[in-house]
Image (cartoon, rainbow, N blue to C red):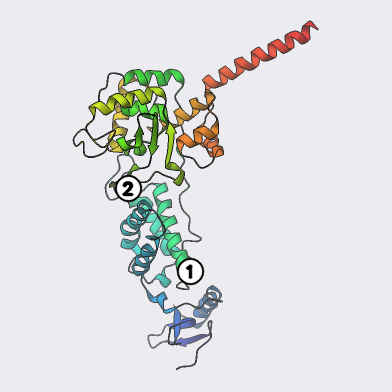
């Protein structure tokens, strides 16, 4: 067996083609033979500078021969590992991001040769023209939040490669990614909510779906995923165990709710219980809200979204997202005195503090009510003081 050469051992030579080459030992194969990494330059001084930079980058690193695998090959291994530890829906997202956005650009490159500059070019390319089918507003641009999701997936995959001594450092570190865009939450006041409930009153198809959304704060995917077996008719209780999830690329799958605490059971408002009891006598499907075209399938969340937008436009209601019905429910529940712990259980949140921070908003109507209450109280106190 050959003598094991120390890592960082560097040499410089002039090649037959006139270029200068510097190389160092960055790891060892199973048989002890060294693994080299080279840099090139037109002059000896140029390549000497590159050599010192490379020595610093690989100081203390001893890579395995797997460093020769392509990024495609590594992603296959990483995804096979992740299959054992993440939810099926999460794995599907990882597979989609890898196949649609990473492999076409960097998949054939050796993983040890992927640089920060390579990854940054990938992100820039995706943001500018990563969308295959044009979006009505964005065109071929990929949203910043999707680029961030690709980054998080790739970072996790390459961090594992660092830990297994396949690469010296994670090339996603040091890249610039788009800022997280948090959509503004909008909440209807009680008058606007009443107008919406009045607007759906005569809709035989969608009334029950949107009424349940307004009265429970369930996510649209959770509503679509409800089965009759989830409804305890006798005790007026509802279990949330599944959600219809729209995957990147548009595929619909039945998965678990958004978080572990999303699997929950709670008491329904009496009006919702009565409505579901009546509905159960009519709907001949395992789904509480089946598709119109095929009752063996649950309602498509996108169909609910488009119908909601149509209702807003038709009735002149303020523009909000369908998910904002959840925020509206939570805000008014707090205003009516529902404690945050109970509300967190209904919404499927881990901590009541998150419910307060995320889903409750002080509306002008609530401010006026609070001002009136404080004004009356202070008036009584000050009135007594003045009389005294």
Residue ID for mark 2: 247
The answer to whether residue 120 is left or right of residue 372 is left
How far across and how far down the image is residue 150, in percent? 40, 55
Q: Secondary structure at mark 1?
A: helix
How far across and how far down the image is residue 271, in percent? 38, 22
Identify the residue shown where x is 44% and y is 82%: 35
The answer to whether residue 169 is left or right of residue 77 is right
Instruction: Say the numbered circle drawn on residue 244.
Output: none
Quarter in which the N terminus is drawn:
bottom left
Q: Is residue 178 visible?
A: yes
In the depicted structure, whether residue 64 falls above or below residue 366: below
Query: Crowdedness of circle 2 by 10 Å Cα count: few (<14), some, many (20+)?
Result: some
How far across and how far down the image is residue 205, in percent? 25, 26
Query: Crowdedness of circle 1 by 10 Å Cα count: few (<14), some, many (20+)?
Result: some
Residue placed most toward the observer, 193 or 122: 193
How far across and how far down the image is residue 276, in percent? 32, 27
The answer to whether residue 142 is left or right of residue 178 is left
Res 106 quadrant in image: bottom left
In the depicted structure, whether residue 368 falls above or below residue 241: above
Quarter in which the C terminus is drawn:
top right
Mark 2 or mark 1, earlier in chain: 1
Identify the residue shown where x is 34% and y is 69%: 73
Q: How many marks?
A: 2
Residue ID for mark 1: 162
In the depicted structure, whether residue 124 falls above or below residue 386: below
Q: Secondary structure at mark 2?
A: loop
């Amino acid at each position: 067996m050959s003598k094991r050469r120390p890592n960082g051992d560097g040499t410089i030579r002039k090649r037959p083609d006139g270029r200068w080459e510097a190389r160092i030992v960055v790891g060892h194969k199973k048989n002890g033979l060294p693994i080299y990494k080279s840099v090139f330059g037109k002059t000896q001084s140029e390549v000497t500078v590159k050599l010192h930079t490379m020595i610093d980058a690989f100081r203390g690193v001893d890579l395995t021969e797997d460093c020769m695998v392509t990024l495609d090959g590594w992603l296959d291994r990483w995804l096979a590992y992740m299959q054992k530890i993440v939810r099926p829906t999460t794995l599907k997202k990882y597979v989609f991001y890898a196949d649609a956005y990473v492999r076409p650009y960097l998949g054939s490159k050796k993983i040890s040769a992927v640089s920060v500059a390579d990854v940054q070019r990938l992100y820039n390319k995706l943001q500018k023209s990563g969308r295959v089918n044009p979006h009505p507003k964005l065109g071929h641009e990929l949203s910043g939040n999707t680029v961030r999701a690709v980054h998080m997936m790739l970072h996790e995959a390459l961090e594992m490669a660092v830990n297994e001594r396949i690469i010296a450092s994670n090339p996603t570190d040091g890249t610039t990614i788009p800022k997280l865009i948090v959509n503004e939450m909008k909440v209807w006041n009680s008058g606007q909510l009443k107008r919406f409930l009045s607007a759906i009153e005569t809709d035989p198809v969608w009334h029950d779906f949107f009424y349940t959304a307004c009265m429970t704060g369930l996510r649209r995917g959770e509503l679509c995923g409800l089965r009759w077996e989830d409804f305890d008719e006798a005790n007026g209780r509802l279990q949330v165990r599944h959600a219809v999830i729209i995957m990147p690329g548009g595929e619909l799958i039945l998965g678990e709710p958004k978080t572990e605490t999303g699997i929950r059971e709670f008491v329904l408002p009496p009006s919702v219980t009565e409505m579901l009891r009546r509905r159960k006598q009519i709907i001949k499907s395992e789904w509480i809200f089946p598709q119109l075209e095929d009752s063996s399938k649950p309602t498509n969340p996108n169909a609910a979204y488009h119908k909601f937008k149509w209702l807003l436009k038709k009735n002149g209601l303020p523009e909000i997202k369908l998910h904002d019905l959840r925020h509206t429910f939570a805000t008014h529940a707090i205003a009516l005195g529902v404690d945050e712990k109970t509300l967190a259980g209904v919404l499927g949140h881990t901590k009541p503090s998150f419910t307060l921070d995320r889903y409750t908003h002080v509306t002008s109507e609530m401010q006026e009510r609070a001002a009136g209450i404080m004004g009356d109280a202070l008036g009584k106190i000050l009135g007594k003081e003045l009389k005294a």
